[in-house]
Image: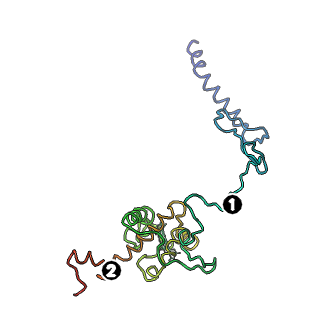
Amino acid sequence: MAQIKCKIKTMSPILGAAFLSLVLIGCRGQRSKEPPIIPIQNMVEQTSYGPQSQNENYKDGRAYRPQILETVEFGKDKTNIRLYQGKEPESTEQNPIWVKKIPIEINDKVMKQGQISYNVFCTPCHDYAGDSNGLVTQRAGGSIRPSNLHDKERLALPVGKIYDAIHNGVNNWNMPGFASQLSVEDKWAVVAYVRALQLTRRASLEDIPSDIKAKNGWSNKK
Ligand code: HEC
Protein backbone atom coordinates (compact mmCIF):
# COMPACT_ATOMS: atom_id res chain seq x y z
CA MET A 1 0.00 0.00 0.00
CA ALA A 2 2.80 2.36 1.03
CA GLN A 3 4.45 1.66 -2.29
CA ILE A 4 1.37 2.69 -4.32
CA LYS A 5 1.02 5.92 -2.30
CA CYS A 6 4.61 6.79 -3.01
CA LYS A 7 4.14 6.22 -6.73
CA ILE A 8 1.15 8.58 -6.87
CA LYS A 9 3.20 11.21 -5.06
CA THR A 10 6.03 11.07 -7.59
CA MET A 11 3.69 10.80 -10.54
CA SER A 12 1.51 13.77 -9.64
CA PRO A 13 3.79 16.55 -11.06
CA ILE A 14 4.06 14.60 -14.31
CA LEU A 15 0.30 14.09 -14.48
CA GLY A 16 -0.20 17.77 -13.66
CA ALA A 17 2.13 18.87 -16.44
CA ALA A 18 0.42 16.53 -18.89
CA PHE A 19 -2.98 17.92 -17.97
CA LEU A 20 -1.77 21.52 -18.23
CA SER A 21 -0.25 20.95 -21.65
CA LEU A 22 -3.53 19.41 -22.83
CA VAL A 23 -5.37 22.52 -21.65
CA LEU A 24 -2.84 24.82 -23.34
CA ILE A 25 -2.88 22.87 -26.61
CA GLY A 26 -6.66 23.25 -26.49
CA CYS A 27 -6.25 27.04 -26.76
CA ARG A 28 -4.27 26.88 -29.97
CA GLY A 29 -5.84 28.41 -33.02
CA GLN A 30 -8.32 30.55 -31.11
CA ARG A 31 -8.14 34.16 -32.07
CA SER A 32 -8.35 36.91 -29.53
CA LYS A 33 -8.55 40.65 -29.79
CA GLU A 34 -6.93 41.00 -26.38
CA PRO A 35 -3.34 42.21 -26.30
CA PRO A 36 -0.84 39.32 -26.12
CA ILE A 37 0.43 38.22 -22.73
CA ILE A 38 4.09 39.23 -22.52
CA PRO A 39 5.54 37.96 -19.23
CA ILE A 40 8.88 39.77 -19.60
CA GLN A 41 8.18 43.28 -20.78
CA ASN A 42 11.67 44.59 -21.47
CA MET A 43 11.21 47.35 -24.07
CA VAL A 44 8.14 45.96 -25.77
CA GLU A 45 5.96 48.92 -24.97
CA GLN A 46 7.55 52.14 -26.13
CA THR A 47 6.39 55.47 -27.33
CA SER A 48 6.41 55.51 -31.08
CA TYR A 49 5.23 58.21 -33.36
CA GLY A 50 2.84 57.68 -36.23
CA PRO A 51 2.37 59.97 -39.21
CA GLN A 52 0.97 63.38 -38.26
CA SER A 53 1.53 62.76 -34.54
CA GLN A 54 2.98 65.41 -32.27
CA ASN A 55 6.22 65.71 -30.37
CA GLU A 56 6.43 68.54 -27.91
CA ASN A 57 10.22 68.45 -27.96
CA TYR A 58 10.31 70.27 -31.27
CA LYS A 59 9.37 73.90 -31.71
CA ASP A 60 6.98 73.15 -34.56
CA GLY A 61 5.48 70.22 -32.66
CA ARG A 62 6.00 67.77 -35.55
CA ALA A 63 7.19 64.30 -34.67
CA TYR A 64 8.27 63.53 -38.24
CA ARG A 65 11.22 65.77 -38.98
CA PRO A 66 11.32 67.34 -42.43
CA GLN A 67 14.49 66.77 -44.45
CA ILE A 68 16.84 69.70 -44.10
CA LEU A 69 17.05 71.33 -47.49
CA GLU A 70 20.26 71.23 -49.51
CA THR A 71 22.02 68.81 -47.20
CA VAL A 72 23.47 65.37 -47.81
CA GLU A 73 24.56 62.67 -45.42
CA PHE A 74 27.98 63.57 -44.03
CA GLY A 75 30.75 62.39 -46.35
CA LYS A 76 28.32 60.82 -48.77
CA ASP A 77 27.76 62.98 -51.77
CA LYS A 78 25.52 60.55 -53.61
CA THR A 79 25.03 63.05 -56.38
CA ASN A 80 28.48 61.95 -57.56
CA ILE A 81 27.11 59.29 -59.88
CA ARG A 82 30.53 58.42 -61.29
CA LEU A 83 31.52 57.27 -57.82
CA TYR A 84 28.23 55.78 -56.65
CA GLN A 85 26.95 54.24 -59.86
CA GLY A 86 29.95 53.98 -62.13
CA LYS A 87 28.15 56.05 -64.78
CA GLU A 88 28.84 59.33 -66.52
CA PRO A 89 26.42 62.09 -65.47
CA GLU A 90 24.87 62.28 -68.95
CA SER A 91 23.73 58.64 -68.70
CA THR A 92 20.07 57.78 -68.89
CA GLU A 93 18.29 54.77 -67.42
CA GLN A 94 18.11 53.08 -70.85
CA ASN A 95 21.48 54.24 -72.07
CA PRO A 96 24.13 54.11 -69.37
CA ILE A 97 27.56 55.49 -70.24
CA TRP A 98 30.03 53.64 -68.06
CA VAL A 99 33.04 55.39 -66.61
CA LYS A 100 36.35 54.27 -68.09
CA LYS A 101 38.57 55.46 -65.25
CA ILE A 102 38.30 54.33 -61.62
CA PRO A 103 37.12 57.42 -59.71
CA ILE A 104 39.16 56.80 -56.54
CA GLU A 105 42.90 57.06 -55.99
CA ILE A 106 44.60 53.70 -56.49
CA ASN A 107 47.51 52.88 -54.22
CA ASP A 108 48.95 49.79 -52.57
CA LYS A 109 46.50 49.97 -49.68
CA VAL A 110 43.50 50.07 -52.03
CA MET A 111 44.88 47.15 -54.07
CA LYS A 112 45.38 45.10 -50.91
CA GLN A 113 41.84 45.91 -49.78
CA GLY A 114 40.55 44.92 -53.22
CA GLN A 115 42.38 41.61 -52.97
CA ILE A 116 40.93 40.88 -49.52
CA SER A 117 37.37 41.68 -50.60
CA TYR A 118 37.73 39.78 -53.89
CA ASN A 119 39.06 36.74 -52.06
CA VAL A 120 36.15 36.83 -49.61
CA PHE A 121 33.24 37.65 -51.91
CA CYS A 122 34.15 36.62 -55.44
CA THR A 123 36.32 33.48 -55.21
CA PRO A 124 33.44 31.08 -54.42
CA CYS A 125 32.38 31.49 -58.05
CA HIS A 126 35.18 33.27 -59.92
CA ASP A 127 38.11 31.56 -58.08
CA TYR A 128 41.33 33.24 -56.96
CA ALA A 129 42.62 33.72 -60.50
CA GLY A 130 39.40 34.83 -62.21
CA ASP A 131 38.95 31.76 -64.42
CA SER A 132 35.65 31.21 -62.61
CA ASN A 133 36.19 27.64 -61.49
CA GLY A 134 35.36 28.36 -57.86
CA LEU A 135 33.87 25.71 -55.61
CA VAL A 136 30.34 26.95 -56.21
CA THR A 137 30.93 26.82 -59.97
CA GLN A 138 32.28 23.28 -59.70
CA ARG A 139 29.41 22.01 -57.59
CA ALA A 140 26.40 23.96 -58.82
CA GLY A 141 26.10 21.87 -61.96
CA GLY A 142 23.58 23.04 -64.49
CA SER A 143 23.23 26.59 -63.20
CA ILE A 144 24.50 29.63 -65.07
CA ARG A 145 28.27 29.60 -65.37
CA PRO A 146 30.02 32.69 -64.05
CA SER A 147 31.79 34.66 -66.75
CA ASN A 148 35.51 34.04 -67.09
CA LEU A 149 37.04 37.34 -66.02
CA HIS A 150 39.82 36.85 -68.60
CA ASP A 151 37.61 36.34 -71.66
CA LYS A 152 37.44 38.91 -74.46
CA GLU A 153 34.11 40.43 -73.42
CA ARG A 154 35.18 40.82 -69.79
CA LEU A 155 38.50 42.41 -70.77
CA ALA A 156 36.53 44.94 -72.80
CA LEU A 157 34.16 45.87 -69.95
CA PRO A 158 34.57 49.48 -68.84
CA VAL A 159 35.42 49.75 -65.13
CA GLY A 160 32.04 51.38 -64.47
CA LYS A 161 30.28 48.24 -65.74
CA ILE A 162 32.37 46.01 -63.48
CA TYR A 163 31.45 48.28 -60.57
CA ASP A 164 27.79 48.00 -61.56
CA ALA A 165 28.07 44.18 -61.72
CA ILE A 166 29.43 44.13 -58.16
CA HIS A 167 26.93 46.70 -56.89
CA ASN A 168 23.71 45.57 -58.59
CA GLY A 169 24.51 42.01 -59.65
CA VAL A 170 24.27 40.69 -63.21
CA ASN A 171 21.24 39.75 -65.34
CA ASN A 172 18.53 39.74 -62.68
CA TRP A 173 20.80 38.26 -60.06
CA ASN A 174 22.27 35.41 -62.10
CA MET A 175 25.13 36.89 -60.12
CA PRO A 176 24.03 38.44 -56.83
CA GLY A 177 24.79 42.09 -56.07
CA PHE A 178 27.01 43.10 -53.18
CA ALA A 179 25.58 46.58 -52.56
CA SER A 180 25.15 46.01 -48.86
CA GLN A 181 28.22 43.89 -48.15
CA LEU A 182 30.83 46.18 -49.69
CA SER A 183 31.27 49.92 -49.23
CA VAL A 184 31.65 52.13 -52.31
CA GLU A 185 35.42 52.33 -51.78
CA ASP A 186 35.60 48.55 -51.33
CA LYS A 187 33.72 47.98 -54.57
CA TRP A 188 36.09 50.21 -56.52
CA ALA A 189 39.01 48.47 -54.83
CA VAL A 190 37.62 45.13 -56.09
CA VAL A 191 37.29 46.62 -59.59
CA ALA A 192 40.96 47.65 -59.44
CA TYR A 193 41.89 44.15 -58.28
CA VAL A 194 39.89 42.53 -61.11
CA ARG A 195 41.79 44.75 -63.57
CA ALA A 196 45.07 43.69 -61.92
CA LEU A 197 44.08 40.02 -62.23
CA GLN A 198 43.35 40.58 -65.92
CA LEU A 199 46.70 42.27 -66.37
CA THR A 200 48.61 39.35 -64.84
CA ARG A 201 48.21 37.42 -68.10
CA ARG A 202 48.79 40.12 -70.63
CA ALA A 203 51.20 42.62 -69.19
CA SER A 204 54.19 43.57 -71.30
CA LEU A 205 57.45 45.19 -70.33
CA GLU A 206 55.98 48.53 -71.44
CA ASP A 207 53.49 48.31 -68.58
CA ILE A 208 56.28 48.30 -65.98
CA PRO A 209 57.34 51.73 -64.69
CA SER A 210 60.79 52.62 -66.02
CA ASP A 211 62.40 53.09 -62.59
CA ILE A 212 61.44 49.54 -61.60
CA LYS A 213 62.72 48.27 -64.94
CA ALA A 214 66.02 50.09 -64.45
CA LYS A 215 66.39 48.82 -60.88
CA ASN A 216 65.94 45.24 -61.97
CA GLY A 217 67.98 45.52 -65.14
CA TRP A 218 64.97 44.75 -67.38
CA SER A 219 64.83 46.36 -70.76
CA ASN A 220 62.34 46.45 -73.60
CA LYS A 221 64.94 45.05 -76.01
CA LYS A 222 64.79 41.34 -76.60
C1 HEC B 1 27.35 33.15 -56.61
C2 HEC B 1 28.34 33.19 -57.65
C3 HEC B 1 29.01 34.51 -57.94
C4 HEC B 1 29.70 35.33 -57.08
C5 HEC B 1 29.92 35.15 -55.58
C6 HEC B 1 30.21 36.42 -57.88
N1 HEC B 1 29.83 36.25 -59.19
FE1 HEC B 1 30.36 37.43 -60.74
N2 HEC B 1 29.21 36.33 -62.00
C7 HEC B 1 28.51 35.20 -61.62
C8 HEC B 1 27.72 34.74 -62.75
C9 HEC B 1 26.81 33.52 -62.75
C10 HEC B 1 27.97 35.64 -63.79
C11 HEC B 1 27.35 35.60 -65.20
C12 HEC B 1 25.96 36.14 -65.17
C13 HEC B 1 25.31 36.07 -66.52
O1 HEC B 1 26.01 36.02 -67.53
O2 HEC B 1 24.07 36.12 -66.54
C14 HEC B 1 28.92 36.62 -63.29
C15 HEC B 1 29.42 37.68 -64.05
C16 HEC B 1 30.37 38.58 -63.57
C17 HEC B 1 30.96 39.64 -64.37
C18 HEC B 1 30.65 39.97 -65.82
C19 HEC B 1 29.56 41.00 -65.91
C20 HEC B 1 29.23 41.37 -67.34
O3 HEC B 1 28.49 42.36 -67.51
O4 HEC B 1 29.66 40.69 -68.27
C21 HEC B 1 31.86 40.28 -63.56
C22 HEC B 1 32.75 41.47 -63.95
C23 HEC B 1 31.81 39.65 -62.27
N3 HEC B 1 30.90 38.61 -62.31
C24 HEC B 1 32.57 40.02 -61.19
C25 HEC B 1 32.36 39.55 -59.90
C26 HEC B 1 33.02 40.10 -58.73
C27 HEC B 1 34.06 41.20 -58.76
C28 HEC B 1 32.54 39.41 -57.65
C29 HEC B 1 32.83 39.64 -56.19
C30 HEC B 1 32.48 40.93 -55.65
C31 HEC B 1 31.61 38.40 -58.16
N4 HEC B 1 31.52 38.53 -59.52
C32 HEC B 1 30.96 37.47 -57.38
C33 HEC B 1 28.52 34.58 -60.40
C34 HEC B 1 29.10 35.11 -59.26
Q: Where does the image place residue 158, in percent across and percent down from the top left?
A: 49, 79
* Camera-side residue of 136 and 71: 71
Looking at this view, name the residue that lies furthest to the left. 217
Q: Which residue is mark 1?
A: 69
Q: Is residue 59 above or below residue 150?
A: above
The label on residue 207 is: 2
* Camera-side residue of 208 and 96: 208
Report the quarter where the C terminus lies: bottom left
* Camera-side residue of 14 and 53: 53
- Hey, which quadrant is residue 25 in on the image? top right
* Mark 2 residue element: helix
Which amino acid, mark 1? Leu
Q: Return the disc, 2 or 1, that comes first in the chain's sequence.
A: 1
* Camera-side residue of 3 and 153: 153
Q: Where does the image place residue 10, in percent across and percent down from the top left?
A: 57, 20
* Mark 1 residue element: loop
